[in-house]
Structures are given as C-alpha cells and as structure tokens.
Image: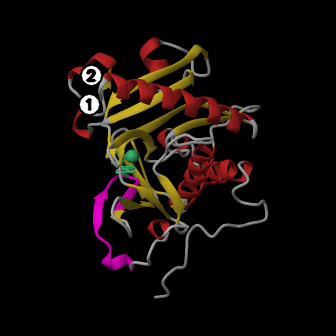
Amino acid sequence: MTDFLKPRYIPMNRRRRIYEGKAKVLYEGPEPGTLIQHFKDDATAFNSKKHAIIDGKGVLNNRISEYLFQNLNDIGVPTHFIRRLNMREQLIREVEIIPLEVVVRNVAAGSISTRLGLEEGTQLPRSIVEFYYKNDALSDPMVSEEHITAFGWASPPELDDIMALAIRVNDFLSGLFLGVGIRLVDFKIECGRLWENEMMRIVLADEISPDSCRLWDIKSNDKLDKDRFRRDMGGLVEAYTEVARRLGIMNEMENISVKGPKLVQ
Ligand SMILES: Nc1ncnc2c1ncn2[C@@H]1O[C@H](COP(=O)(O)OP(=O)(O)OP(=O)(O)O)[C@@H](O)[C@H]1O
Ligand SMILES: [Mg+2]
C-alpha cells in the first residue's frame, strides 16, 4: 500500500469538519484530496420534514455501502471509495459533486407511481434514468437533460458519462441483489468530478445503501429499505440487517453491536 493510502490516526476532536448533512458528516482526510465520510444514525424524509434517530442505521449503511462500492471498484466502475476505517467511517476521495440526484428505476414505486398513475410494483418497460437538481430549498426538483446542460450543472459529455455509469451500476447491482433474493426497484446515486493530473473523470460518490435504494424481497415483496421509515412501518434496523446478512457482510451468528458502548452515569 502506498503511503498515500495509509491513513494517519487523527483524534476525532481535532479533525476539521467540512460538511454536516442529514445522514453523514464529512471530515478532512489524512492526505490532501481525501475525506472521511462518517455515517450518522439520523433518518430524514420528505425534505427533512420527518426526522428520527435510528440506533445502528449508520453502522449498517457504512458496511452495506462499503460492500457495494468495493464490488463496483472491483469490476472497474470508478468510485470515490478507498477503504472503510471503522464501524461508522470510510476514507474517500474528495470530488466536486455534480448537483444532481440520478435516479434509476426498474419497477414503479414512490414518486413515479404518483406522477404517472402507475401501480406500485409495475415492471417498467425498461430501466428509466431521471435527474433531480440537488437543492433542498427547492425540494430537489426533477429536471431534464436540457436544464442540466443549459444551466451548466454538467456538460453534454459529462452527462453521457453519468448516464453510462448509472446504467452500469444498475446492471451490476440488479444482478447482485437478485442473487440474494432482493429486487432492486430503484436507487439514487451522486456523481462527482475527480482530477488526476490534468485528467478529469466522472466517478460514483456519496453512498449506496437501503437509505438510497428501494429493495424488495423477491418472494414476499417485503420492503427492506427507507420506505419503512417514510411510511411508518417500523422494523428499519431489522430490514437493513437482513440486507447486510444476505449480502454476507455479517455472518448469521454475529450480533453486531450497532449501538456502541453507553456512558455509565
Ligand atoms: N467524495 C465526495 N466528495 C465531496 N463531497 C461528497 C463526496 N461524497 C458525497 N459528498 C457529499 O457529502 C454530503 C453527504 O452528506 P449527506 O448525505 O448527509 O448530505 P444531505 O443531507 O443528503 O445533503 P445534500 O443535499 O448535500 O446531499 C452530500 O452533500 C454529498 O453530496
Ligand atoms: Mg445525502
């Protein structure tokens, strides 16, 4: 391993916090061009109108996202992921985030069902890619390729790369989840620009987890994703744990201590 990839230990309280979002915190990384992505237990929905702390969610998302990004790295999909550091944190490459949420849909659910009057669970004629402008104040409105290129959020060739990346991620993840009895209904990704010398590449950034996917059990159609929180169904940690277990991240006997040590008063 090159020195660049060997993180030096930086005590938590001396790290520089770069950004705190709804579900994660970004800290300055050990080397220039790196960041530490910390997964919190916060769950939000409907543009933060609904919020809760769900013990253990951050640990599960860190592990599931690590697994998916590592598998994508292994098949040559460029990603920001370097390696997991601990239960809640991973070392990533800093990128310039393209302000788009790229959604790939295989089966109708959520907003597409509402907007187009499709019953949830309807197989779409083919995978559909949608773009939303990342802007909380505007509640992430849906935008077209015309808007994206006209406003300069991404150039036409960048948009081609983003589409190709999204389709490749969908093909790979659909197969991976199918292999463990899960239907990948839809998911959201974020992409960023990564400069290496004079070259710029579009890479997969942020996270892929049950927070950002719809995952249904193949047989029962049980929801194993954040819809359990959005729709007040309960059992979120159990569902995320089941995804991790099926992916082989946690062996069946491992009772992962997701809550961590408690302060004795
Ligand atoms: N490799 C990266 N380099 C820089 N920023 C990143 C990288 N990966 C993810 N990010 C950004 O880090 C933040 C992660 O925090 P979180 O997901 O909690 O944000 P959020 O509350 O969803 O808000 P946002 O609307 O900004 O996504 C996001 O803004 C995401 O775009
Ligand atoms: Mg986010």
Residue range of the region highlighted in magenta in the rendering: 11-26
User: What residue is disc 2 on?
Assistant: 149
Q: Nearer the viewer, residue 243 or 152?
A: 152
Q: Is residue 226 covered in magenta?
A: no
List x then y, in percent, for residue 149.
Answer: 26, 22
List x then y, in percent, for residue 37.
Answer: 42, 59
Left or right placement of residue 46 versus residue 147 in this view: right
The residue type indicated by label 2 comes to: Thr
**Residue 153: which disc?**
1
The residue drawn where x is 50% and y is 57% is 82
Q: Nearer the viewer, residue 147 or 217?
A: 147
Q: Is residue 140 above or below residue 70?
A: above
Q: Residues within 10 Å of mark 2 (few under 14, many from 20)?
A: some
The residue drawn where x is 49% and y is 41% is 212
Indicate if the residue with disc 1 has its beta carbon within 8 Å of ligand 1: no
Q: Is residue 92 above or below residue 151?
A: below
For residue 179, say whether it is visible: yes
Disc 2 on helix, strand or loop? helix
List x then y, in percent, for residue 245.
Answer: 72, 53
